[in-house]
Image: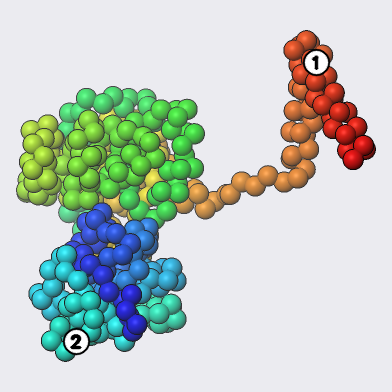
């Protein structure tokens, strides 16, 4: 930290979800993220980063995105809208500094020769004000979103009306529970809540892109990974799970590129369908005869879809109509109920423990001998105390 700001090693990427994988707490992050969403903000906070510079406006005002508010409330310094010049002039690994006024410099101290750009310093108050201002435009966005959804419903109706061509997989799902994990809102907390369910019911585990890493982080092995593979770690991709690459309707599959780099592209299946990757996961479970589909982290409301950059939800609407009879949406289950133990519940437990101990004393000679020894030691200690 410099007297009038911060200095550190620059890490940059136009994809926030890729950048957070290599951030250290002492780094300065440079992103290019219009309308920063909740998941991006939470991942930046989890990295321990203290300074984030955004080349784009973190809130455009198109809809109320909560990312900048979460970031600033967590104490992270957010320098907003510095422009693309920062990406043009700066390279990863360089030392940079930023002043409390939002001036960005190359080097560890501000200097005229190293000046790069100036951004807007966001505070929790300014982020809150921007969030509230954007709420006034939500009705307009809702109308546009609904119109776009209706426009594409007829184009994507094959999802529900036709028999889908589903990849041939090795993992059996017939009459089984299937847990679909998406890297969405509160996904980590929800997986943690569902740990006992996973251990008891042993559902088929499907990770949608980064959802595969979420499963691994909680100690579970994904059976299937499905998506465009742009946010899946090499560890997850090589974990032994079946890989299904989500392709465009015309057959193009950019998701094969990271698999080719790892030498495992020949093991992957390609599924072209005009839908989201999480839709594909739900449809796969349905078509393969799953008895119950449990979804964690899936997107299901206007703000979440706008956060993902989507202008409609035709495929998701149709998918949920189709799989609805078997779908249990567990997103947010961690916020539904937080168990607490009241004193009234503790007394019966303590009484039960005492009963067990008394029974052990009555039936076990070793336990009685141990108790006698403890009593003798207490008597000896009391005698010595009285003498002193």
Q: Which residue is mark 1?
A: 368
Residue shown at 19%/42% (left/top)?
234
Residue shown at 86%/28% (left/top)?
380
Residue 98, can we see it? yes
Q: Which residue is mark 2?
A: 111
Mark 2 Cα shell of 10 Å, populated few (<14), some (14-19), many (≥20): few
Which x, y percent locates residue 33? 24, 69
| Residue 139 position (above or below residue 214) | below
In which quadrant is the N terminus drawn? Answer: bottom left
Which x, y percent locates residue 328? 43, 42
Compare marks 1 and 2 and give the one earlier in the sequence: 2
Q: Residue furthest right?
A: 386
Nearer-the-camera pick, 155 or 36: 36
Q: Residue furthest front?
A: 388
Nearer-the-camera pick, 143 or 209: 209
In which quadrant is the C terminus drawn? Answer: top right
265 sits to left or right of 348 = left
Q: Are marks 1 and 2 in contact (CB under 8 Å)?
A: no
Q: Quadrant of residue 206?
A: top left
């Amino acid at each position: 930290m410099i007297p009038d700001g911060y200095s550190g090693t620059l890490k940059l990427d136009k994809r926030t979800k890729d950048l957070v994988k290599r951030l250290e707490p002492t780094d300065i992050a440079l992103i290019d993220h219009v309308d920063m969403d909740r998941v991006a903000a939470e991942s930046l906070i989890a990295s321990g980063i203290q300074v984030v510079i955004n080349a784009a406006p973190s809130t455009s005002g198109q809809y109320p995105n909560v990312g900048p508010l979460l970031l600033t409330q967590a104490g992270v310094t957010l320098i907003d809208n510095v422009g693309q010049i920062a990406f043009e002039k700066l390279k990863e690994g360089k030392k940079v500094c930023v002043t409390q006024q939002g001036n960005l410099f190359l080097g560890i101290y501000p200097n005229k020769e190293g000046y790069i750009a100036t951004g807007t310093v966001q505070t929790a108050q300014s982020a809150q004000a921007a969030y509230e201002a954007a709420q006034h435009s939500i009705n307009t966005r809702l109308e546009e979103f609904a119109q776009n959804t209706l426009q594409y419903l007829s184009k994507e109706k094959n999802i529900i009306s036709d028999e889908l061509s589903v990849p041939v997989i090795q993992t059996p799902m017939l009459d089984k529970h299937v847990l679909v994990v998406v890297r969405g809102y509160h996904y980590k907390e929800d997986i943690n809540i569902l740990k006992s369910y996973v251990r008891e019911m042993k559902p088929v585990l499907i990770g949608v892109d980064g959802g595969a890493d979420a499963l691994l982080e909680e100690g579970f092995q994904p059976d299937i990974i499905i998506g465009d593979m742009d946010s899946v770690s090499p560890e997850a991709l090589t974990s032994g799970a079946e890989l299904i690459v989500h392709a465009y309707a015309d057959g193009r599959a950019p998701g094969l590129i990271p698999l080719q780099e790892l030498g495992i592209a020949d093991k992957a299946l390609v599924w072209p369908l005009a839908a989201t990757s999480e839709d594909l996961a739900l449809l796969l479970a349905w078509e393969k005869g799953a008895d119950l589909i449990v979804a964690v982290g899936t997107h299901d409301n206007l703000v979440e879809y706008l956060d993902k950059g989507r202008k409609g939800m035709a495929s998701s609407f149709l998918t949920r109509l189709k799989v609805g009879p078997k779908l249990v949406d567990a997103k947010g289950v961690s916020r539904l109920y937080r168990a607490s133990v009241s004193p009234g519940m503790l007394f019966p437990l303590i009484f039960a423990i005492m009963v067990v101990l008394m029974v052990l004393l009555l039936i076990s000679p070793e336990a009685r001998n141990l108790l006698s020894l403890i009593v003798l030691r207490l008597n000896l200690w009391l005698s010595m105390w009285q003498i002193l």
